[in-house]
Amino acid sequence: LSGNGYPTTDDWIKLKKGDLSDAELAQRAARGDVAAQAMLGAKLSEQGKIVHGYANLESAAAKGSIYAILELAASQAKAGNVIESMAWYQVAVLRGDHQAIRFGSMEWGKPSTWQVQTASQYAIQYYQNLAALRASMGFGPFDNTLRPDFGVRPPDMNLPVGLYNRPGG
């Protein structure tokens, strides 16, 4: 999952507890840690610093972070922007995360046909924008192979999608 820009379980827990400062995340992002850049973007967005948050999330997404794309989708859902949220979840699917749309549907319920069609058009544009940003950074095309599937999450823990040992294993 780290190859797709997901934070480690430890970093994600630290982020949710508030143990990772903006400065620490920014330093790690400056050193090329794409997951840290995505976490910084998510944190800034939650703090209401939308422009800086989205800039970090979009940059991390262009560098290959599917986690950043999922954070963009979740942020749009929290803001009540159903079509934009659906579009970002579709971008995650295009990038190889075929579970993403399932998570999105929990946030916005059953969309209308018009919403689905509009979100699909937005998704194509968002993907093209990320690909262009990626090229401007000197990276090649996206590798859209499937991301690894995940095991069972530890019980009673609000952890991100990740690889976990199965109970008793």
Image (cartoon, rainbow, N blue to C red):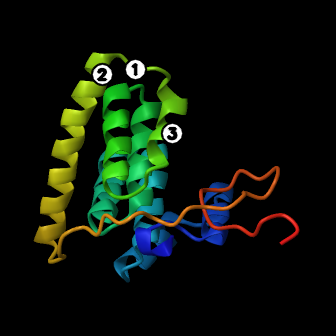
Q: Calculate the distance from the C-alpha at mark 1 to the C-alpha at mark 2.
A: 6 Å
Residue drawn where x is 26% and y is 18% of the image: 114
- Secondary structure of the residue carrying numbered label 1: loop
x and y, in percent, of residue 28 in the image: 44, 78
Residue 95 visible? The answer is yes
Label 1 near label 3: C-beta < 8 Å? no
Callout 2: 10 Å neighbours few (<14), some, many (20+)? some
Residue under circle 3?
102
x and y, in percent, of residue 48 in the image: 43, 41
Residue drawn where x is 22% and y is 27% of the image: 118
Which mark, by number, is residue 111? 1
Task: Say which quarter of the image contains residue 79.
Answer: top left
Q: Is residue 154 left or right of residue 80?
A: right
Residue 26 visible? The answer is no
Callout 3: 10 Å neighbours few (<14), some, many (20+)? few
Label 2 near label 1: C-beta < 8 Å? yes
Task: Say which quarter of the image contains residue 87.
Answer: top left
